Image: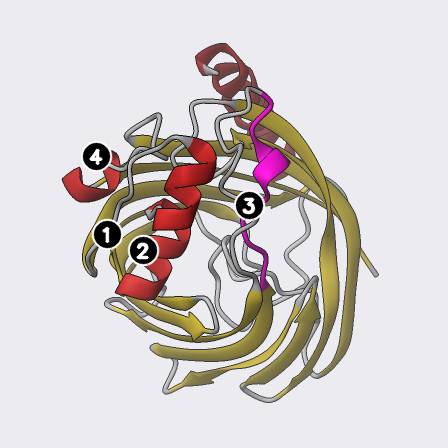
Amino acid sequence: MNKVALQIVTFLGALSCYGSVNATEARTALVPLPSIDDFTNGDGWGFGLGLGVEYETAYEGSDEFEFEVDPAGGVQYRTGDHLFFWAGEAIGWRTLVKDTWLFQSSIGYEEGREEGDSDDGRLDGLGDSRSGVTVLLEVRHALTEDWRYFLDGRVLTGEVGTLGIFGAGTCLACKPNGTGWEVGAVVTFHDGKLANRDFGVTTQQSIDSGLPATDVDSGYRSTGFNVSYRNYLHKNWQIFGEALYEAFGSEVSDSPITRNNYEAEIGVGFIYVF
């Protein structure tokens, strides 16, 4: 994994030099943060279509890694300081208040773990974990006018349980069009429902899989670090990249489902902005 990650980071670094010369700054994003897609150019519609490739853990707590190819982009409509969006399995709204507060809400679909996600058969007997509709509520607050430093709070809740994410970040060499580097750190907490969906083993699952029955309490889940990158290679072509490392807490790490005490992923992709 380290070799793959190094190659992608080196690739992004080289392209950042190219992009800084060939990028366009005609667009102005609602919020100048690389982690937030914005395909609009002032009021009106914005469209983006592309593809991303990720190298990531096969499931939460897995020691197996795999490549995954996913579509990227979305449809957006902006009016003033409000932006409505549809991307993948989520539809939502975000708004900027007094230039320093970003509020976002969305409805999406959270897919659960499948028994076949482990090529080594380590999930045999556990069945598929629950999937369901989720609601995301997010608030970001800029500590400086240019969003160089900011605080971030998110709550994801629904049929599968509740996850809380709280952190802070900094934007490096970011521009009004939403390009640059963003680095963040977060801590996460889960309720018992989500904790046991991902890391618990019921009595029946224990009989079927041979793993010890496990009940995971609500509370601290993990500490994570993430890096996001976005740039224009041409007037309409964006490149984006992201990397994530998440270290699990002791109770999650002690689950028989957990083979690694961390989760990691790195990805890169391209989007054509219409």
In the rendered image, residue 141, in percent from the top left (x then y), is placed at: 30, 72
The kind of secondary structure element at disc 2 is helix
Nearest to N terminus: mark 4 or mark 3: 3
The kind of secondary structure element at disc 4 is loop
Residue 272 makes an appearance in the image: no
Nearest to N terminus: mark 1 or mark 3: 3
Q: Nearer the viewer, mark 3 or mark 2?
A: 3
Crowding near the residue tagged with mark 2, few <14, some 14–19, many ≥20 C-alpha atoms within 10 Å: many
Q: What whole-number distance in Å separates the C-alpha atoms at marks 1 and 2?
A: 6 Å
Q: Amino acid at mark 2?
A: Ala
Crowding near the residue tagged with mark 3, few <14, some 14–19, many ≥20 C-alpha atoms within 10 Å: some
Q: What whole-number distance in Å separates the C-alpha atoms at marks 1 and 3?
A: 18 Å
Crowding near the residue tagged with mark 4, few <14, some 14–19, many ≥20 C-alpha atoms within 10 Å: some
Are the two marked residues, 2 and 4, in contact with CB atoms closer than 8 angstroms? Answer: no
Q: Nearer the viewer, mark 4 or mark 3?
A: 3
**Highlighted range, magenta:** 110-119
Q: Which labelled disc corresponds to residue 216? A: 1
Q: Which labelled disc corresponds to residue 195? A: 2
In the rendered image, residue 82, in percent from the top left (x then y), is placed at: 57, 86
At 31% from the left and 41% from the top, the residue drawn is: 225
Most common secondary structure along the magenta stretch: loop
Nearest to N terminus: mark 2 or mark 4: 2
Q: Which labelled disc corresponds to residue 254? A: 4
Q: What whole-number distance in Å separates the C-alpha atoms at marks 1 and 4?
A: 10 Å
Nearest to N terminus: mark 1 or mark 4: 1
Q: Which labelled disc corresponds to residue 127? A: 3
